[in-house]
Amino acid sequence: MRFQVPQFVDIEDKIIGPFTLRQFLTYVVAAMLLVPVYIYSDLSLFITIALPILGIAAVFAHLKIYGRTFSQVTFSAISYASKGQLYIWRRLKNSPLKIIDDEWDAARASAAADRESASLSSIAQSLETTGNVSKQDADDPLVV
């Protein structure tokens, strides 16, 4: 083997205790948000505010959806929702179809008449023979 290929590239290194650098920084940001609340409020208000913030920080630090972090999924969802959507075809409810010319209308009417005149047995026969139906009598090559 000429080259040594690294394995487990997608696994982040544990840098600070059991946390990766990204997880640790997420908890640091949450703590920085909670320090002023702890200093300027009483304990019950601090606990009321700290629990949701720490819960959200834990979700952002640890949750992965299909191998992507929750912050990446959230960013993708926000960018998808904020950009314009491209509609290739959108049917309007009250817009009637417009016929371009009379020849096309006549061809459509004759095709509808042909469909109505086709009997159920001929349709069944064409389905059974995969469309190879001849309405003329043919000579049998085996009969002499």
Image (cartoon, rainbow, N blue to C red):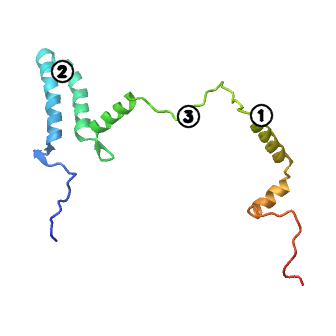
Of the two numbered discs 3 and 2 in the rendering, the one whose residue sits closer to the viewer:
3
Given residues 75 and 95, the one toward you in this image is 95
Label annotation for residue 89: 3
Label annotation for residue 137: none
- Identify residue for label 1: 102
How far apart are the two marked residues, 3 and 2, measured between alpha carbons? 53 Å
Q: Amino acid at mark 2?
A: Phe
How far apart are the two marked residues, 1 and 2, measured between alpha carbons? 78 Å
Tell me the SS state at disc 3.
Answer: loop
Using a 10 Å C-alpha cutoff, classify the residue at mark 3 as few (fewer than 14 neighbours), some (14 to 19) or many (20 or more).
Answer: few
State which quadrant residue 132 falls in: bottom right
- Whether residue 79 is situated above or below residue 12 in the rendered picture: above
Q: Amino acid at mark 1?
A: Asp
Q: Amino acid at mark 3?
A: Trp
- Whether residue 119 is situated above or below residue 20 in the rendered picture: below
Q: Is residue 40 left or right of residue 82?
A: left
- Identify residue for label 2: 46
* Tag 1 near tag 2, CB within 8 Å: no
Query: Closer to the N terminus: mark 1 or mark 3?
Result: 3
Of the two numbered discs 1 and 2 in the rendering, the one whose residue sits closer to the viewer:
1
Which quadrant holds the N terminus? bottom left
Query: Closer to the N terminus: mark 3 or mark 2?
Result: 2
Given residues 52 and 91, the one toward you in this image is 91
